[in-house]
Image (tube, grey):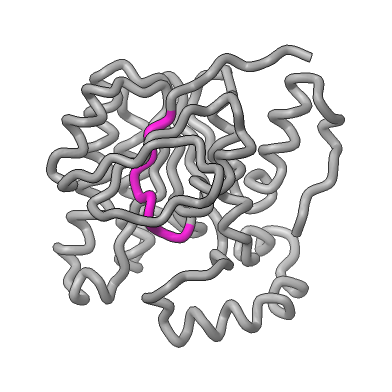
Amino acid sequence: MSEPRIRRMVLIGATGLVGMRLIEEARNFTAVRLTALSRREAPLPDGARMEMIIADPANWPGAIADMKPDVLACALGTTWRKAGKDEQAFRAIDYGLVVQCAKAAAHGGTRQMVTVSSVGADANAKNFYLRTKGEVEVALKKLDFARVDILRPGLLRGHRESDRRPGERLAIAAAPVTDLVLHGKYRRFRSIRAEDVARAMLALASEKAEGRFVHDNDAIRRAPALARAKRGAIPATSSFAD
């Protein structure tokens, strides 16, 4: 079994739902050396093998350019409430800051970007949230990365300290039932655990193929097993949690 080389990953969006799960899961991915950029301190899980750099978001692009990571991982995103229900403020984070950091990484020689988008993302969508996510995807695909991985999870399940809207909480509570009726092309709208998304982001950092790749729920869940199979660790058909 061949061992993958160590890849230096910088994470933005470290204190969010997926970001915190990625920090936890990184303990099990010895081929990734993780550094997180954050605007505020956050407790690290026991056994975390990483460092967290606290900096103003305005300084993140410069910090990324200086660190020259192999992989930029993005789990960054604000909420409608935190943005003051203002489209310009929302877009400044979910589009502006994400693309600024990505450009700094690409110009600095970073090979790969792995980012969390959303099911239904479409630059031509009428929905502002989905349109913004789609526009980010278009911008990232144009940058000079050898590889871009875009993850489009369905409804994210996991503990979030705040900002769960009543409708979102209701959808999560109903997910065990609604997931059962979502088949075929609608499977991509099923709920998915935040830790599954985090594991996929870490696993995809070991991929060598170049190109632009979009991963739906099923592909996200399969990514860790497929990555291990390519190293000869387990069969590619290994099962994964639903």
Residue 172, quarter of the rendered image: bottom right
Q: Is residue 124 left or right of residue 168?
A: left
Give the residue displayed 36% in from the left and 53% down from the top: 133
Q: In this view, does 150 lie to the left or right of 188?
A: left
In the picture, measured across the screen, residue 109 lies left or right of residue 114, that is: left
- 206 to 167, vertically: above or below: above
Numbered range of the magenta stretch: 9-17
The answer to whether residue 60 is above or below residue 221 is above
Q: How many marks?
A: 0
Magenta-colored stretch includes residue 62: no
Quadrant occupied by the N terminus: top right
**Which quadrant is home to the C terminus?**
bottom right
Tell me what residue is drawn at x 78 percent, y 27 percent: 229
Q: In this view, does 220 lie to the left or right of 129?
A: right
Say if 102 sits above or below 119 in the image.
above
- Within the magenta stretch, is there residue 12? yes
Please name the residue shown 69% across and 29% down the image.
227
Identified at 35% across, 51% down, the residue is: 76
Examine the rendering and report whether any part of residue 145 can be seen.
no
In the picture, residue 79 is in which quadrant? bottom left
Specify whether residue 189 is in view: yes
Q: Position of residue 28 (x, y in %)?
A: 64, 38
28 vs 92, nearest the viewer: 28
Q: Place residue 100 in its image quadrant.
A: top left
Residue 67: horizontal and vertical position, in percent? 28, 23
Give the x, y percent position of residue 184: 74, 60
Counting from the top left corner in percent of width and height, residue 208 is at 57, 18
